[in-house]
Image: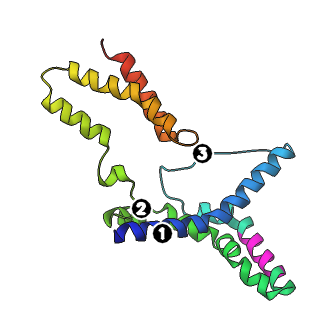
Amino acid sequence: MLRMQVSVFMEMLISALLAPIRMLSHTRFVLEALFNLKLKWAGQNRSGESGWGEALPQSGVRHRAGVELDHVRLLDDPMFFIWSLPVAIPLIFAAPIFVLLSRIQAGQHLSAGALLRIPEETDGSPLLKRSWRTILSAQSASSVVRLYREHYRSAPQRLARRPGPPPCAARFALANLQALARALPG
């Protein structure tokens, strides 16, 4: 229970640090799109670490914006300066935040401490557990086919009961189940 509470606190802290940085990046992308400027919206790089050489040039504008905005706020109203620190501090320290959060060793250390894990990482996937139990206890492959067909048929109803659009992982799982159901005999 303590690990979950620490993970929740860490997630809130990381989200609070990233929110102003994302806000500035998304504002830039919207302005570039509105003024028909060169727009480059690249996906996230999850294949490796970001180094200082990559982080410093990308976060220079954010750093300068954070410093200058806070300087203006300090001259204008010291109380407003204090209230604006949760937005300015992540902008000022954007490069170290990028570098720290991209470190593979940091993720491995958190994983070893069972922090910031999703339920499937700690308990395993309920679908896979049920599948293996069926496979191990089945007399023939037909029960495996039946299991996946049952899951495939009930997946849309389970997704429909959730409020809002289905999450990306659920859409991905549903697409995989549909493809599997088409490929299986019967």
Residue pointed to by mark 2: 116
- Neighbor class of circle 3 (other Cα within 10 Å; few <14, some 14-19, many 20+) is few
Question: At 42% from the left edge and 60% from the top edge, which residue is drawn?
Answer: 104
Secondary structure at numbered mark 1: helix
Stretch in magenta: 63-72
* Spatial CA span between label 1 and label 2: 8 Å
Instruction: Pick whichever of labels 1 and 2 is earlier in the sequence.
Output: 1
**Amino acid found under the numbered disc labelled 2:** Leu
Instruction: Pick whichever of labels 3 and 2 is earlier in the sequence.
Output: 3
Residue 37 visible within the image? no
**Amino acid found under the numbered disc labelled 3:** Gly
- Relative to 74, does residue 116 appear above or below in the rendering? above
Estimate the x, y position of residue 71 in percent, counting from the top left: 80, 81
Estimate the x, y position of residue 28 in percent, counting from the top left: 77, 55
Estimate the x, y position of residue 141 in percent, counting from the top left: 20, 20
Q: Nearer the viewer, residue 40 or 118?
A: 118
* Spatial CA span between label 3 and label 1: 24 Å
Q: Nearer the viewer, residue 70 or 105?
A: 70
Name the mark on residue 43: 3
Dot 1 and dot 2 residues touching (CB under 8 Å): yes
